[in-house]
Amino acid sequence: MINLVLALGLIPVLLVLRRFYHSHFAPTFLEKPEGGVPRPPLVADWVPFVGNALSMTRGDAFWAGVIRRYGPVVRVRAMGEVRTFVTTPGLISYVYKNSRNFDFLHFRRSMSSQIFGQNANHAQSDAMDAIIFPGHHKNMQPGSIADLIRKYADHLEGGLKQAVEAVGDEGKVVDLGDHMFDILYESSAKAFFTPSFPAAAFKPSFMAFDAAFPLLNLAALPAIARRPAEKARDEALRIIEEWWVDISDEDRQQLAPSMLGMVEASEAEGWPLRDIAAFFLSEIWALEANAPYAGIWAVVELLRNPSALTRLRTEITDVIATLSPPTLSTLLHKPQPELPGLLPYTNAVFQETLRYHVDTLSLRVVQSDCVIPPNLLSGGIGAETGLRLHKGEQVICATRVPMVNEEEWGADAGKWNPERFMKGGAAGRSMNPFGGGVSMCEGRHFASAEILTFIAAFTHLFDADILSDTMKANPQRIGLGVQQPMGGVTRI
Ligand code: HEM
């Protein structure tokens, strides 16, 4: 018994020693500089395997502390993987521009099987790079999505009309986040997958899959720990397959061009139903895991800032008065490229919401050993010599760090203030809410129309007051795009 107590007592001592070693020796000593060029410093951590995973939930404060201590390029251990993070606009653009040495496509193919459930051999086949990815990219360009946006506007109008009737003259206490999510989720899902898709019935499975996404993303996790996440994914795929086998020819032709393109390419390759369902799941996830939350945050920030809300409502009412016919419906059906010019303040609200609420970790894999040039390193280890990266190493662009940096955006960078996007006030500053380079978001044109029209319609049709405001970003959800809100109750 005494031996057991002694052995248990040793654990904290060993952890402290390990931490001391990593803090003071490992960053510079463990791996000797090769040719005088050191490796990026390894951020100290307490617990093997888990590493800094818990500290990273501190978000902006974690990064500020790490950069102060180690410099702008660091290696961080989290959940069994050590990855290199770059955190300044110059370094991020260096990685995005050198797409040959910082590869993304291998990761995108792996995601298709590891996360969405496509057959692993098919996911790594030439058809993905030659047909599926380029086709999807082309089909999400502004020229290809005009009809999709028109359908979305129709469903948004229908959904909002129903919501107005349900609220009635008396008003109603609702969870604003859930309420708005449902409107955005159903309108966009119906536009992409036709009203035949059982969007409402699928929502619990989508939510379960979305919650499982971070676990599916962890390649180093033992198989047994991944199992519940894979079960959630299999259930989502099962529902999609059930719907898909009975879809009519007419509905099939009405799918979003990006989706129909992937279906036709899979069929031409002779791939099974499960692969087609996996493409549907990836499209639904891309569609619903970010844009609805951006719409929710925009409205919540407006409610928290009444003068911004008044200014935005005035803009919308004034613009509607100039249209023919002068209705909200005409505004909602305007082509996407016209909207930012027509609604400059609403667009500033949208941009500021992205700046303030997007947290993306954008991943690349190093193709051959290289050195990050010293002129990109403002301080820390390697400022004189550069930093050495090894083939196979994962490099992550931490795009949020510069988007909330005071040097970049001024002393009020930590506050939501759409004014900064008026009159070109954001020009030349670091702004990568949609990622960059070869992995830049293909849905950004659709997302911009979806969110701008939603903000316009919701604020024009509803009066909302906040009864209690506990809404904040879910700290467990790291690096996957728009922050997920948790909490918050409101009356409309
Ligand atoms: C406000 C809403 C959105 C935000 C903030 C957002 C953000 C992003 C970001 C940051 C990436 C790059 C990820 C990386 O580099 O690792 C990305 C990729 C992507 N997004 Fe979005 N997204 C949004 C909406 C959408 C929508 C509505 C779609 C439509 C289906 C979509 C489709 C995609 C696709 C297909 C990619 C992968 C591009 C590639 O791998 O080359 N996104 N998104």
Image (tube, rainbow, N blue to C red):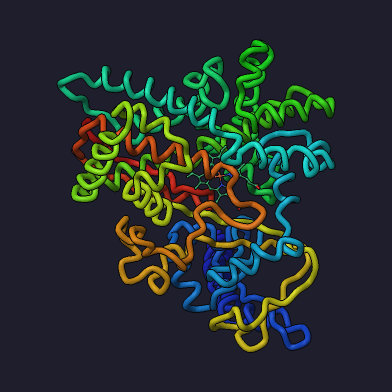
Along the line of sight, the residue nearer the viewer: 181 or 79: 181
Q: Residue furthest left?
A: 170
Above or below: residue 141 compared with residue 333 = below
- Report the side of 485 relative to 206 (left or right): left
* Residue at left offset 61%, top offset 83%: 375
Quadrant in which residue 19 is drawn: bottom right
Number of numbered discs on residues: 0
Q: Name the one closer to the observer, 282 or 37.
A: 282
Question: If the image is split into quadrants, where does the C terminus sit?
Answer: top left
Above or below residue 252? Residue 229 is below
| 216 or 330: nearer the viewer | 330
Q: Quadrant of residue 327?
A: top left
Task: Give x and y (percent) for residue 453.
Answer: 38, 36
Image coordinates for residue 458, horizontal then vertical, percent: 31, 33
Residue 490 screen position, x and y as percent = 24, 35
User: Would residue 241 appear left or right of 70 to someone viewing this image?
Assistant: right
Q: Nearer the viewer, residue 312 or 413?
A: 312
Q: Residue at x 78, y 66 (%)?
A: 391
Q: Position of residue 49 (x, y in %)?
A: 63, 58
Give the quadrant of ligand 1.
top right
Question: What's the residue at 78%, 38% (across, down)?
Answer: 131
Q: Residue at x 52, y 25 (%)?
A: 191
Name the quarter where the N terminus is drawn.
Answer: bottom right
